[in-house]
Amino acid sequence: MYAYYDQAKAFHYGSISLIAEPCRSAHFRALDLAREAGAILSYDPNLRLALWPSAEAAKEGMLSVWDRADVIKISDDEVPFITGKDTLDDDVAMSMWHPGLKLLIITMAERGCKYYTKEFHGTVDGILVNTVDTTGAGDAFVGAMLSQMVDDMSILHDEKRLREALQFANACGAITTTKKGAIPALPTKSEALSLLQETDAANH
């Protein structure tokens, strides 16, 4: 187990494992080990309110690991739960920022995503596809995004490269919605790049 963490480049976590013991304590221990190993800590709150004893417990649990993250990906429908605000403007987004955060992403389904770093922020347009099942789209997005940054975190200081990485992540998320199921719908890299080429050609 410890050898695994020594080799890890990223540790991605959610909030569901914080609901009850002993999973909660294991979650915190895993975060400590990943941090010691120098891994990127990536957090997707992934709110599933029905699994928590109350909304208050859910919010407290979700925020209990918020400040640990290097990267946070949150969906637009989760922002009001965390912030108490119904808008997605920059002030609301930055109210979720913490001093150790390197990248904040707000995903907006077919409308793409917003991104915030310490140096710049912006929006990357989504990709329209024939949606069949949205299960796993967020996971595909995060996995694709992390795959683009784990080997070179300097991408967070280069807006052009970050936007390209997020375009790739958008493509992976979009393709995942075109098929039923989460794992079976995950695209290959070549499928995502092909969709990006098609989209670019259609826009020019």
Image: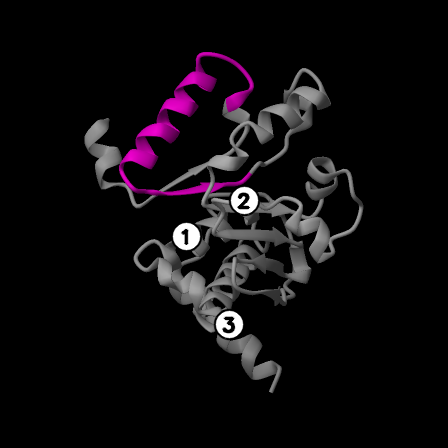
Disc 2: which residue: 136
Residue 196, numbered label? 3
Residue type marked 3: Leu
At a point 29% along the width and 42% down the height, the residue shown is 38
Q: Earlier in the sequence, mark 3 or mark 1?
A: 1
Q: Which residues are magenta?
A: 18-44
Q: Nearer the viewer, mark 3 or mark 1?
A: 1
Q: Label 2 sits on what residue type? A: Gly
Q: From the top left corner, tell me how far across and down residue 120 is, in percent.
A: 55, 65
Q: Nearer the viewer, residue 154 or 111?
A: 154
| Kind of element beneath mark 3 | helix
Q: x and y percent of residue 190 in the render?
A: 39, 66
State how far apart marks 3 and 1 are (Cα): 18 Å
Would you identify the image quadrant in which residue 59 lies?
top right
- Quarter holding the N terminus is top left
Are there few (<14), some (14-19), or many (20+) residues within 10 Å of tag 3? Answer: some
Q: In the image, is residue 31 above or below residue 159?
A: above
Calculate the distance from the C-alpha at mark 2 to the C-alpha at mark 3.
19 Å
